[in-house]
Image (tube, grey):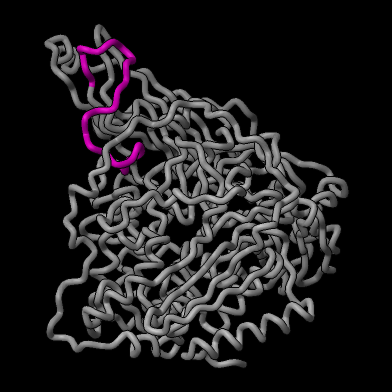
Amino acid sequence: KISFCNSYRRVSIEVNKLLSMLLSRSLLKHSRSAAVRAFSTVAPNTGGESTFKGKHNSAFATLGAAALFGAAAAGTMTALEEESTYESDYKGQARPKQKYPSPEHNPLHAKDSHNSEYNTPPPRPDLPTISIDDVAEHCDEASLWYTFRGAVYDLTFFYHGHPGGEPRLLMAAGQDLEPYWEVYRQHFRGHVVPWMEKYRIGNLSPEDAEKAKKGQFGDMFETDPIRDPNNLPCTVKPWCGEPRIDLLTKDYITPNELFYVRNHLAVPDIDPAEYVLIVKGKGIKKHKFTLEDLKTKFPKFEVTTTLQCAGNRREDMHDDDHKIFIAPHWVVGAMSTAKWGGVRMRDVLKHCGMDVDAMALGESTPDNIKHLQFEGYDTDETGLCYGGSIPIDKAVDGLGDAIFAFEMNDKPLPRDHGFPVRAIAPGHAGARQCKWLHKVIVSDRDSQKSWQQKSYRGFAPDINFEEDLSHWPPPRLDQAPIVQEMPVQSLVCNPPQNSLVGMKDATDITVKGVAWSGGGRKVERVDVSIDGGKTWTAAELYKPIEQRRNRHWAWTHFNKTLVLPEEIRKRLARGEQVKLDITSKAMNSDFNVQPERMEPYWNARGVCINHWYHVKTILDPNRQKEDIQHDSTENEFSNTPSGGKFTQPWGQHGWTIDPEHQSDPKAHVEPESAHF
């Protein structure tokens, strides 16, 4: 066990020695991946520098070693660089041509709406001046200090509460946060710094504050694939993009390039010839499968299912009275549908020795086999991989349709969706359906990864981040279940939010949308309203595929042409514009109906959000019928929360909201970005 070092030279020597030992003994191996690029941290007071070079199979080793020593140890700079001569044999599938026109440009007003002091800590002359060298000493679990724009913070208590994970918090310890936040710009949303002020312990001198600004942090996202303009980023790094919801009703099966993308980390660029899936754990024999093994040893199975992120519509819960301290703040569109092709999980587990039939029938219920854990090839800067799990009964159920997928809509998985193999567990939250699947582990407990244990839990309304979740673990964790299956949901997609709808000589309006329920429950009815929910009428439902009871994995489209009330028709006839408040509520086969408001179920993680989604529309009698145009409101995003407005400054979730961070975060890309 090697303790954390505060000396740059000692860190460099020890890391290089450890790397040499590990590599010489061939203890580390990884598929080729361009996911990890250059990483660096700088403490300007030393001026020292150390650079490690190696191919992709050693990149994660270097990263892991840096994490072991606390890559952000005081006064250090470490960098990982891949060999420039590396070229993947896999060139990727052709990028689809853009199917729909790009969204209209909506002016960003972050520069105008916030002054130069935005996100800047207030002056605190009452606090002591602390040197940058002293801050650098506090870089391990026992003491975690950070600086930001001249302020010094002690966030030691926050080690287990950080939503981004413990390793990342440790990585930046003893240093300035701004270089890290330049990449992870969601921190600039405006509520993070005021919360940190509670834990401020001092100030840097003007000279040290200037030095701290010179820190650098490499960008591991430069190899991410290029996305369709209609896939709207709620965060860019990692990419969390949602389709324009006015496009969702144009296709029952969402085109691959428009399907919502929820990445927790950077996107690996994996050579399929080197891909290996490891299946191991309780009660089975360990097996390793290549992509070819999966395609040839098991019968192919296809399932059409809707995926929705557990945190879809999270921005609705972020307002003046409540703040959400976890990203992304989805707006509304993190829900899409595809046909997935692959092999059944139960077939693979049976091949590995599990009696899946006896377990599915309840004839065998081993105490040591309760969960199926997944781990991905995607990792953060410290080498920590993404992971989650589902109950074992979902995997072994012959009617559960859970698969290891290698196709999406009859094509190889795109990189953003887990190429070459991902988990698909129909009816469950998207977070449980691990992409870039590396390991499958049969276990007596669910995944211990933070994304399973911390990120997606439904807390009671009186639990908040500031007082409870930041001091992890909070009291009564047993009252915050981990999200698996999702509640019933519906969204009005057309007419679009904040639109001017031509109504010349018109007497009716057509409303279209999508509805879905988790757990395979059928959408039995969708009611629509054009007066904010005062009156309702049932819509017509459209589902072109047949799915059986408790296997209604895919969404239902709905539409209704409503005759306008006489009062509205008279106003239009007089040439007046008329505002409508259009909403919907779906009912599933369990007779569960969407709630009207979010207050009764508000939760600090912002999950399972399904209250009525309100669309504000203006009817214009001077425009031709069905002529639809975005109104003059200065929205910063093509999708908006319920009601058509962001209650908090949005600026595309932080990456254009801070005046000092206005550059395009996608300006620098590597050749691998061309791989779709």
Residue at x 25%, y 77% (from the top left corner): 151
Please tell me whether residue 506 belongs to the stretch shown in magenta. no
Q: In the figure, residue 275 lies in which quadrant?
A: bottom right
Q: In the figure, residue 436 lies in which quadrant?
A: bottom right
Q: Position of residue 265 (x, y in %)?
A: 53, 59
Residue at x 49%, y 29% (from the top left corner): 557
Vertical position of residue 29 compared to residue 175: above or below: above
Q: Position of residue 581 (x, y in %)?
A: 25, 31
Q: Which quadrant would the C terminus be assigned to in this image?
A: top right
Q: Position of residue 43 (x, y in %)?
A: 40, 79
- The one nearer the camera, 426 or 193, is 193
- Res. 519 visible in picture: no
Residue at x 38%, y 37% (from the top left corner): 585
Question: What is the magenta segment's predominant secondary structure?
Answer: loop
Q: In the figure, residue 353 lies in which quadrant?
A: bottom right
Vertical position of residue 659 compared to residue 162: above or below: above
Q: Tell me which segment is drawn in magenta.
A: 619-641
- The one nearer the camera, 117 or 536, is 117
Please tell me whether residue 638 belongs to the stretch shown in magenta. yes
Q: Is residue 328 left or right of residue 624?
A: right
Q: Which quadrant would the N terminus be assigned to in this image?
A: bottom right
Q: Farthest front residue?
A: 47
- The one nearer the camera, 451 or 169, is 169
- Res. 344 visible in picture: yes
- The one nearer the camera, 132 or 300, is 132
Q: Position of residue 395 (x, y in %)?
A: 70, 56
